[in-house]
């Protein structure tokens, strides 16, 4: 089906028509400064940890970065790496990679933009297997789980348990890392004084920050550390089952009709058990099974 973009009103389109409009092939990436590298495709029954370092999407500044580790290989092994300038749109990339790897435990840094994006993935896309920390709260008010998503990295950085755990597993050669850009960034990592007024030899832990000897932020290193932290912690978080429910009105999952698009049986053929209904239609009416996410 071909639609005239100059005359059609997008709000009146059915989800299937909307998807049909934007099916296109891309020979070259539409924007420079982005990379998606898949080293190994998902393996049925395996669990994956997705570690994310968020950025603002400003060219020449920190990059968004994502690392995926297969938690069910011995030793755990890296299967994907993403980096680039997405900014506000990076939550879509994160959600896509979580869906691609299926049983994916999401660990993101809760920096100045991270918490909001983790909440968006949880509420708008209904991706429920998300790392959170019990950060307490006032005696009269209990903090919601969604207010505690992600990791707040410790300062000083040298005492950060996430970085320390990652350094230990690398030193012990107990992890397989495949991305050459990640490995090079790890080789360039150094501890530097936060202020030029402090001499390196006399600096304390609180004076030191992580940086690259080549300049810039260690985005890939942080994403790798987050993904390994997820490997260590995922057994403490029960992988939820997805309910057969509609997405809330106005969420992206509702607009793009994810309940139908991501139904278990996506071949859109009647398998004989639904009296002529498509499998996705039966699922949306609550008569289908439950799928783990």
Image (cartoon, grey):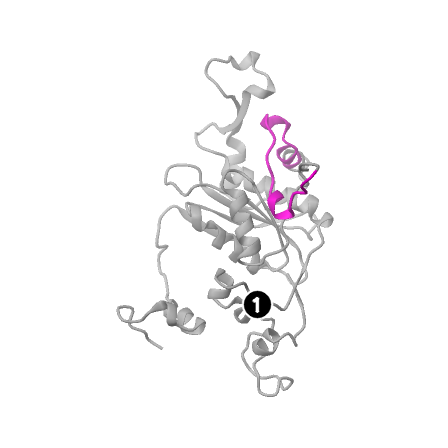
Task: Write down the region rendered in magenta.
Answer: 140-166
**In the rendered view, would you say 103 is above or below 220?**
below
Q: Secondary structure at mark 1?
A: loop
Find disc 1 in the rendering and name its residue: 246
Along the viewing direction, whichever of 258 and 27 lies nearer the viewer: 258
Is 165 situated above or below 81? above
Rendered location of residue 285, percent (x, y): 61, 76
- Left or right: 111, with 272 as reference point: left
Q: Position of residue 263 (x, y in %)?
A: 58, 71
Q: Is residue 11 inside the magenta stretch? A: no
Looking at the image, which residue is at 68% across and 58% down? Answer: 240
- Residue 287 lies left or right of residue 29; in this view the side is right
Where 231 falls versus 273 (above or below)? above
Q: Residue at x 67, y 72 (%)?
A: 289
Observer-nearest residue: 97 or 274? 274
Q: Is residue 53 visible?
A: no
User: Which quadrant of the structure image shows residue 161?
Assistant: top right
Q: How many marks do you count on the picture?
A: 1
Quick check: can you spot residue 46? yes
Residue at position x 47%, y 33% from top? Answer: 217
Residue 16 lies in what quarter of the image? bottom left
Image quadrant in which the N terminus is located: bottom left
Asked if the magenta segment contains residue 148, the reply would be yes
């Amino acid at each position: 089906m071909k639609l005239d973009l100059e005359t059609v009103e997008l709000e009146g389109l059915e989800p299937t028509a909307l998807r049909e409009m934007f099916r296109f092939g891309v020979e070259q990436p539409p924007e420079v400064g982005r990379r998606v590298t898949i080293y190994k495709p998902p393996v049925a029954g395996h669990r994956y940890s997705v570690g994310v370092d968020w950025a603002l999407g400003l060219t020449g500044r920190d990059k968004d970065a994502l690392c995926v580790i297969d938690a069910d290989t011995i030793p755990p092994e890296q299967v994907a790496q993403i980096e680039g300038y997405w900014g506000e749109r990076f939550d879509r990339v994160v959600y896509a990679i979580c869906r691609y790897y299926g049983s994916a435990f999401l660990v993101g840094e809760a920096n100045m933009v991270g918490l909001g994006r983790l909440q968006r993935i949880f509420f708008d896309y209904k991706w429920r297997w998300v790392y959170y920390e019990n950060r307490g709260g006032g005696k009269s008010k209990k903090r919601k789980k969604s207010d505690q998503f992600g990791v707040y990295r410790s300062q000083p950085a040298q005492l950060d348990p996430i970085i320390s755990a990652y350094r230990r597993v690398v030193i012990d050669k107990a992890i397989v890392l495949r991305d050459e850009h990640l490995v090079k960034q790890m080789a360039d990592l150094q501890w530097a004084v936060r202020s030029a007024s402090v001499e390196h030899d006399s600096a304390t832990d609180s004076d030191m920050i992580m940086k690259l000897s080549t300049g810039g932020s260690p985005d890939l290193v942080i994403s790798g550390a987050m993904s390994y932290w997820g490997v260590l912690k995922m057994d403490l978080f029960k992988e939820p089952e997805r309910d057969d429910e509609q997405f809330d009105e106005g969420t992206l999952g509702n607009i793009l009709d994810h309940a139908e698009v991501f139904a278990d049986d996506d071949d859109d053929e009647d398998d004989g058990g639904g009296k002529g209904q498509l499998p996705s239609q039966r699922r949306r009416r609550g008569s289908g099974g439950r799928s783990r996410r």
